[in-house]
Image: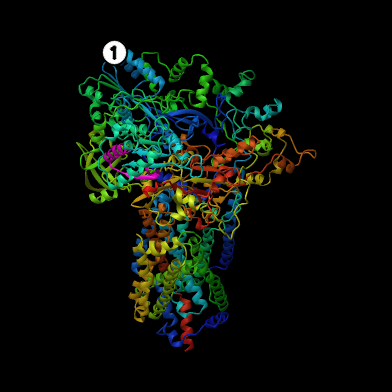
Amino acid sequence: MTSATAEGSAAAWPAPDRSPAADELALLPKPQTDRALTEQLLDCVLKPPAWLDRAILVTGLGSFVLIAAVTYTLITGIGVWGNNIPVAWAFAITNFVWWIGIGHAGTFISAFLLLFEQKWRTSINRFAEAMTLFAVMQAGLFPLLHMGRAWFFYWLVPYPSTMKVWPQFRSSLTWDVVAVSTYFTVSLLFWYLGLIPDLAALRDYAKEPWRRRLYGIFALGWHGSAATWRRHRIAYGVLAGIAAPLVVSVHSIVSMDFSIGVLPGWHSTIFPPYFVAGAIYSGFALVLTLMIPARYLYRLEHVITRDHLEKMGKMLLVTGTIVTYAYAVEIYCAWSGGDAFDRHMLLHVRPRGPIAPIFWTVIACNCGSPLVLWSRRVRMSAVGLFVVTLAIQLGMWLERFLLIVSSESADFLPANAHYYSPSVIDIALLCGTLSFFTFLFCLFLRFVPFIPLSELKALEFELRGRS
Amino acid sequence: MSSLKHEHVEPRAGIEPEFGFDQDLAPSALSRREFMQVSAASIAFATLGACTRAPAEKIVPYRVQPSEIVPGRALHYASASTLDGYATGILVESHEGRPTKIEGNPEHPASLGASSAIEQALLLELYDPRRLRTIQQRGAPASALEPLQALRAAAAVERKGSGVHLILPAQSSPLVVDQLKRLRQRLPELALYFHAPLAPTNAWQGAKLAFGRVLDTRVDLRRANVVLALGADFLARGPAQLALAGAFAERRAPDSPANPMNRLYAVETAPSVTGSTADHRLALAPTQIAAFASALLSAVARGVDGQASAAFATLPTPALSDDAARFLAALSADLLAQRGASAVLAGDEQPPAVHAAAHALNVLLGNTGSVMSHAPPVVFAADDPEFGSLRGLREALAADRVRTLISFESDIAFSDLELRGLLSKAKESLCFALFPTQTAALSSWQIPSAHALETWGDALAFDGTASIVQPLIAPLYGGRTLSEVLAVLLGEEPNSAHDLVKNFWQGRHPDDFGEFWELALARGVVAGTLTDAVIAPLLEPGWFPELASASAGPQGIELNLESDTRVHDGRFGTNSWLLELPCPITKLTWENAAWLAPSLARRLAVEAGDVIRLRAGAQSLEVPALIVPGHADGAISLALGWGRENEAGKPIGVNAFALRAANARTVNVERSGRQAELAITQGSMQLGDLAESILVSSTLSQYRAERPARPIKKQLSLYTSDAPESARQWGMVIDLNACTGCSACVIACQAENNVPSVGKGGVLKHREMHWLRIDRYLIEEGKTERALVQPMACQHCEHAPCEYVCPTAATVHSSDGLNQMIYNRCVGTRFCSNNCPYKVRRFNWFNYHQGERSPRELAENPEVTVRARGVMEKCSYCVQRIRSAENRARVEHRPLRDGDVRTACEQACPTRAISFGDVNDPHSAVARLRQNPRAFEVLAEIGTAPRTRYLMKLTNPNPELT
Amino acid sequence: MFPAWSTRVFRAALCVFALTIISIPAGLWAWERTPYVTGADTPRAQPVKFDHRHHVRDDGIACGYCHTDFARSPSAGMPAVSLCMGCHAQVWTNSAELEPVRKAYFEAAPLAWERVTRLPHFVFFDHSVHVSKGVGCVSCHGRVDQMAQVYAVNSFTMGFCLDCHRAPEAALRPLDKITDMEWARSSSDESGSALRRKYDVHPGTDCTTCHR
């Protein structure tokens, strides 16, 4: 029945190329009964492991670093950061672009892979979606915070003010506000919608009345009738349709924060596709970085199989290659183009200037490290993947830092060439968001079924049922 | 409107000292309480934002409104500022009785409408929160009467003034001079000293050697085709700098056939403003300059016939390096070719013999009488060989012969370390000072003196022209004026400076005094007071031995102590505008450093920023090293006047007077092993291969050959102009050929536009706020490097990259072509600064303005918004001046004329390098200059279409030296 | 587990949620236009009960007699205490009402009036230009001659200024009627656009017209 509706909804979309059944079966190697799945997955929530609460406590305390740094910045001024003229943007915007980039994997996995009927998304999509939400929350903090007068943030929103003036619609920052908030809203809805059936399952499975009541409220009275399922699937499909273009639009707009600038190294039309690829690249990396430990700690090897890892590895390989290609094109354009300043920036300042170490680390992490994924053995090994993903996180953060700081610190007039070093507050803000992000993620593990139970059952039924 | 709220703002007594001396708001200075308060406030802001109520304000009208005051309209008064006794005429702008801006007085010979950074910064000195506020006896507050009695007792006639020692700054004031003469008759035994560490005593003594009497030298550079500066920075130092720079620039225009472009040779130790402007520059150690002078003198003497020259032809010619010899040969040929139309100027730091040689050269070349002339010195007692020396005082103190020591605005303890130890031996010492100086701290009485803008007085310009000094505001802290103090010593009834000056001049103009006085005050100069030139025949030269000894120094690294164009003799050593003004050569702020040539640094293995120990005789000094291309190899230069203490008691720079005391010509240099962070504003001075798109320069001959040189083609654009073009389009042209890089415009801009200082810490973080800066670049030229300067401010691009990236439209284009920056709409995303190719936008990282916590608020221009924390700011083309001139024209129902609007930088510039006006008005000066074949746009290839254009820098090299 | 009515509660909750989303911005939009925020229409208590009705209507004193600079300075000018005493040295010489004025004059105790028409410190307004281009006092300040205690009749928000700067015709009047409180354009008078041409009125709408 459920599968039938799934078929039905799928039929609406161009028939995806079906991979051989054997390959699909590899996703769930050993047959499992619904009951077994239910018990195991829901127990993750109802009988949380001891380490989790400790992790929540630690990261919760760590989040106070963020709060302190934010308050201090707000009341004292942006001057407490390391920024200067010419380097008016640095850590804050780097963090923003990095977090928002990470925030792309979730929706990509949920929306695109759903539309293309990729069965392997099932076990990991909720992970990815949660991660997206939390990442976007971190990201959204920085554009607000980096303003000199954050309390006037609403001037970026078009509204009929007594001043009779409107925002500058030619500025990409104005569109950032729209893009990021839309993206966050849609991702939230998408995540919650997928969550409802499982919340209902928790409601029914939980023992304590307060749990049943709480989950009951959030389950919005779900009773799993065929009609409900059908509506659910349709809504899910529609939302996927809305979310998919957002994946592309958000980071394209973010990339224009640079590409509409005149600075050497910024003024380039390649940025939108290159940023989107980079975003998905770092996003997938972080999904793995989070999933691999969880998979080990919760003993979920049979749900999140080596096959899942292997497929994620392939994604990394693809996006990594696109990013490498973008780097190459950027440098080639500078070299072949007539712009002396551009050439100086990409052929001298970045690879040979004082900032060169960062440049070469970026190349090593983003272009070098994924190359090991050509080997199936590495793709299948959790440890190997984990190491690679860490390298990619670092590489992608440094990439944004390099892009911003190198172009600002050595733009046109030699007289303006000044470098940049972060202040304690800058570093506190970065660490603070990392800690806050982990905190939110632990809460997610603690209170929400992080493996989409219903979808997994459906998939189990689909595979075994057909065979 | 805004002006009303400024009525009756009186600085309250006991204002707490500012938040960190250099206004560098160290966040650590934030108390927990403040933290909580402000956080509450910021949360309130964040939630309410614009929905807060309009605060209640009060309007306090005058009791009786002075007839001349129209609230909201500024008044201008003519006065004069004096430095080392020489006056410079100024016009001071006043809003409701509050001086807010200083300009040059066009009628005054030493200003001609221009002003230097120092005149501009007098305003900040007036409102400096560190000024002495109360009379104190050994730290205890005292009444005004007590020091009066002390003075009276000291000046008792029967004592004849024995044991009374009086120290004053150099004086040219006719009133004071008259008082001093009478004082000497009344108290014959009173010892009088003049404290003027940077007075041109060498020049005076040089004149004495050459002519047998002390004379001032005046130069008419408009008549000179060839100028030689022997260590003379005449464009940026000295009492006539503004007039000289103006006259010099008049002869740098390449296009006027009437007066062809002149040629400037500079022989100097440390690179100076003049040296950087010169067509040919030769870097020599001090003794080598003397050697060069004598060699040149003999070469020229051989070139001119007649027995006058015979005496000099025999002058022994010391050995010179090949470069120097080549330079000398070409130079002497050039000078000889331009007899009667050249000028040889020697710097104040040069020994008397070199000045004598310069005089001899000018006489031999027949310049004296045409270009140069001489006149009796305007400074009182200049012909006293002991002028400026405090030896007598040291001896008297050592011998306990000093009963009463009266020092007036003379920080002798700062500039004379030996005296510092002896001052306590004076039985009683009265120190009149503006600031709590070291002398004040060591004196038994501290008495506030009145600031130049608070006093009545008079003073003479370098050419003897007299000016009446009139106050703009009553003494803020009851300061005393010198003439008042002298009146007390003369036993006269206590008399206000105003009456003293008025009576004195009434004595000179008994009849028609009324209109004489009105006219003198209105014009700022007293007509017909210019002292006439005298004909002084050259003596038989008896000074060859002195010249020889000056040119044959002991072996070793020579020490070159120079005056500083910003802090002078230390008088301005705590003035944050001047301290933060980048050095015209090195762009160093907030301190002085030892300058070394790269070659010497290599030999000594010294890196920039290394702290080195300079040992001269018994004295030694630790100072950071700065490597300066173009510096003479065999010497180390250090600027005097630094080392005054800030509020925290930490010295600002190092006090080089310590080394001067040693009176040694060479120094030993050791590395201390420590490193110092130098607050230098400019990133790199290497122009590389970007000259064509940033700073175009050429030579006169080349330019003549290939003109019309650079047609500026309108950039192709997909967009139509952002704003509907109105008839009037503002624009600026900066003539790099006239600009010397003296940096007066930088402070003029800061004063006009309420630009804050950020302190050394701020500069180290590259957060200086100057709207207008002077970039200095070095380009290879044969074996040496040529320095090029370029004033850089907002270019008001017609296609401004900053405008389309601002999310709140806080920076947009006006219909008359201004790139507007609207502070109150700015949320501070700083995208505009990122996207500005010239990086001329400035960001308020903190709340830099102190508000009512500091009397500095009174210096703020009420026509310009005071920017709060978190907003961007930049050059506005002085839009407040544009709009008020437009409004004035509208009210008077007349059209706006070219020249009605002058930007602050344009007005201050001594060389008239900056022109501003309507580029659509074919008759405006700026429109004509934009069409000049030398015109170019900076970074034109980006397509920003800057509204500010520059005129190519030209040099006029001697073919024999190229 | 949940009673039947919980569904209704849930639906109601959804509606409330949707309403708040809309009403918060709407509320703020309205709030910043209230006189409470703009300060319009609220008479301010002054140290002296100065009654414009009496001075203007009964005594027929023109605006410019006290606000001396309105035609020659950015600031219209507040009368110096000596000006008040000019008359009140003769009339009402010992009225208790005028005690603060006398104190201000004889004992130099500052007489601090409450500002009624306030612009932010970053706004630079010039009275002299407006009056010399035919904008009357009443256009911005209203019928002050009918106010016992003066209050602002307009919000003086940026919008208020822009409305007139974009289309000044309605506010223009003959130059000899600037201080006339009663003048109203009659058919015989010149039209606003005629006056605009006559006085060459081109009010700027560039930011720097008011913000510098």
Give B159 or C86, whichever is nearer the viewer: B159
Question: Which subunit holds the residue at mark 1?
Answer: B
| Pick the front one: B898 or A180 | B898
Residue B698 horizontal/vertical position (percent): 44, 51
What residue is shown at x 33% (from left), y 17% (from top)? B151
Amino acid found under the numbered disc labelled 1: Lys
Q: Left or right: where does residue B858 sit relative to residue B584?
A: right
Q: How many marks?
A: 1
Question: Which secondary structure lies at badge 1?
Answer: loop
Can residue C76 be seen? yes
| The image quarter in which residue B395 lies | top left
Q: Main secondary structure of the magenta part?
A: helix
Q: Badge 1: how crowded within 10 Å, few (<14), some, or many (20+)?
A: some
Most foreground residue, C73 or B711: B711
Q: Is residue C5 above or below residue A309?
A: above
Quarter of the image with the N terminus of chain B in it = top right
In-front residue for pair B946/B722: B946
Is residue A207 visible to the viewer in this orientation of the structure?
Answer: no
Q: Residue furthest front?
A: B306
Colour style of the rendered protein structure: rainbow
From this view, report whether residue B689 is shown above or below residue B892: below
**Magenta residues (range):** B275-299
| Placement of A340 over or under B417, stated as above or below | below
Q: Residue at x 70, y 25 (%)?
A: C59
Q: Is residue B297 magenta?
A: yes
Which of the 4 image quarters holds residue B296? top left
Residue matched to label 1? B160
Residue C17, horizontal then vertical, whole percent: 56, 60
Q: Position of residue A312 (x, y in %)?
A: 41, 76
Q: Residue furthest right?
A: C188
The picture places residue B603, in percent across and down from the top left corner, at 23, 50
On whether residue B532 falls in the magenta region, the answer is no
